[in-house]
């Protein structure tokens, strides 16, 4: 049963008044920290806990023992960071309602902006920029130019000045394991470093929005940002497959309509990933304004395979013949090469040696065993159909 509005707001005011008195806050501001919460608490000096009407429930969960957690299930705690005192409140009553009313942070109004800057610094310190994805130079530059570079302030100002469309659609295609996820992670990390918005939409998220009581509003939310940012659509094959090769569904029409929308969306880049070859993507989806650039991720070349090997631990590199490893992995995906590294490490734990030949043999045996299991599950034959890997 949902709590009544006046009871909910009264409970919030009671909790805010409590921490205001204990923390001696002037003109207090309550806020939800979102992604800044954990770095904020991790960087701050933990103060004393506060009971709520004599209630204080500590949390012994071993997964929550590291820095960045208050150690409480019910109650509040004071903190200090860069000379600013603030409080964290944890007092959920009903998980069916917005938790931010009864689980929130509070600080003096005069220190609010200062605390935000400290939280932003804390987030950046624990999340340094990741390594760029291993891509051909031209492809990496194209990816950057059409994502992070597109959203830079100077570029957006220029686009708006001349009446351009401040929205970009980027499609990453190709067989699995060849760097699409690596590329998305790079863009995602760069968004976080810049404090831009980002959202990852899976087919399940999309279907949940479609089934909601206010589907139109829920889907519109999936496709929009409040400020500039990137929205990732992961493996949205159902919505973008060619309607001439698969049965057309309402999902496709809704997806394409939401992508365009009635309201103009600015300062957003849509990044779509799919294992389907470009020829199997619906033409309506590929038109400019929906997809502006498509990047194909194929198995890495010898040069790219060597670049991946050079990121492996120095002990592994010293223990194997790198040139031979590049030659032996012709046609391998990045994911398959990473599995070889795991096998090398497992073997070294047993024998204290980096046995490249054993890792290759074990990898081949594991893959053959997997294929045998798949064939058995399918009655020893595969259906004759065109799949998203493009095989007949």
Image (tube, grey):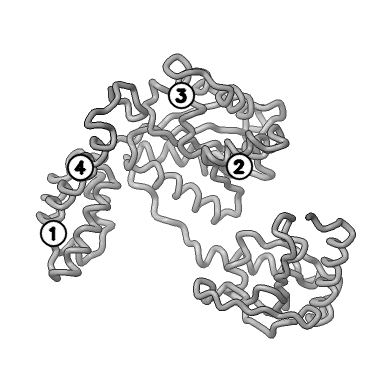
**Mark 4 or 1: the one toward you:** 1
Residue 105, percent from left and from top: 72, 68
Distance from disc 3 to disc 4, alpha carbons, whole Å, reads: 32 Å
User: Who comes first in sequence, dot 2 or dot 4?
Assistant: 2
Is residue 132 at least partly visible in the picture? yes
* Mark 3 or 4, closer to the camera: 3
Residue at left 39%, top 47%?
Answer: 182
* Residue under pointer 3: 241
Nearer the observer, disc 1 or disc 2? 1
- Which numbered disc flags the more N-terminal residue, 2 or 3? 2
Residue placed under numbered mark 1 in the picture? 320
Query: Looking at this view, is 49 or 11 the one in front?
Result: 11
Q: Residue at x 28, y 57 (%)?
A: 311
Question: Which mark sits nearer the N-terminus, 1 or 2?
Answer: 2
Question: SS for tag 4?
Answer: helix
Q: Secondary structure at mark 2?
A: helix
The answer to whether the residues at label 3 and label 4 have Cβ atoms under 8 Å apart is no
In this figure, which residue is indicated by the disc labeled 2? 154
Query: Quick check: 206 above or below 34?
Result: above
Q: Is residue 232 visible?
A: no
For residue 289, which quarter of the picture?
top right
Q: Residues within 10 Å of mark 4 (few under 14, many from 20)?
A: some
Instruction: For label 1, count other residues whose C-alpha is less than 10 Å away and answer few (under 14), some (14-19) or many (20+).
Output: some
The Cα–Cα distance between marks 2 and 3, rounded to whole angstroms, is 36 Å
Closest to the camera, between mark 2 and mark 4, is 4
Q: Helix, strand, or loop for circle 3?
A: loop
Between the residue at mark 1 and the residue at mark 2, the CA separation in whole angstroms equals 47 Å
Nearer the observer, disc 1 or disc 3? 3
How far apart, in angstroms, are the residues tagged by discs 1 and 3? 43 Å
Residue 74 screen position, x and y as percent: 70, 74
- The quadrant of the image that shows the C terminus is top left
Alpha carbons under labels 4 and 1: distance apart: 16 Å
């Amino acid at each position: 049963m949902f709590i009544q509005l006046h009871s909910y707001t009264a409970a919030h005011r009671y909790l805010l008044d409590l921490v205001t008195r204990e923390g001696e806050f002037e003109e207090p501001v309550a806020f939800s920290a979102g992604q800044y919460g954990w770095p904020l608490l991790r960087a701050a000096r933990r103060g004393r806990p506060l009971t709520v009407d004599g209630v204080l429930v500590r949390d012994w969960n071993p997964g929550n023992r590291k820095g960045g957690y208050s150690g409480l299930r019910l109650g509040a705690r004071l903190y200090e960071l860069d000379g600013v005192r603030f409080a964290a409140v944890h007092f959920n009553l009903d998980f069916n309602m917005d938790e931010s009313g009864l689980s929130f942070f509070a600080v003096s109004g005069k220190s609010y902006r200062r605390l935000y800057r400290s939280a932003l610094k804390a987030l950046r310190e624990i999340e340094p920029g990741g390594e760029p994805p291993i891509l051909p130079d031209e492809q990496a530059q194209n990816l950057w130019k059409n994502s992070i570079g597109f959203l830079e302030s100077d570029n957006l100002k220029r686009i708006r000045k001349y009446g351009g469309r401040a929205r970009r659609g980027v499609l990453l295609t190709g067989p699995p394991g060849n760097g699409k996820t690596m590329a998305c992670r790079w863009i995602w990390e760069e968004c976080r470093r810049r404090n831009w918005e980002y959202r990852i939409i899976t087919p399940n998220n999309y279907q949940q929005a479609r089934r909601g009581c206010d589907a139109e509003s829920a889907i519109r939310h999936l496709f929009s940002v409040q400020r500039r940012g990137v929205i990732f659509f992961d493996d949205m094959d159902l919505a973008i497959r060619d309607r001439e090769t698969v049965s057309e569904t309402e999902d496709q029409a809704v997806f394409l309509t939401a992508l365009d929308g009635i309201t103009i969306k600015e300062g957003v880049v849509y990044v779509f990933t799919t294992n389907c070859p470009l020829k199997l993507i619906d033409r309506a989806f590929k038109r400019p304004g929906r997809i502006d650039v498509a990047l194909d991720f194929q198995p890495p070349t010898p040069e790219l395979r060597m670049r991946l090997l050079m990121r492996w631990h120095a002990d592994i590199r010293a223990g194997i013949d790198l040139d031979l490893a590049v030659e032996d992995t012709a046609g391998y995906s990045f994911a398959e090469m990473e599995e070889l590294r795991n096998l090398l490490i497992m073997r070294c734990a047993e024998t204290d040696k980096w046995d490249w030949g054993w890792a290759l043999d074990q990898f081949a045996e594991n893959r053959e065993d997997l294929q045998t299991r798949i064939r058995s599950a399918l009655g020893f034959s595969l259906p004759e159909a065109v799949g998203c890997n493009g095989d007949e």
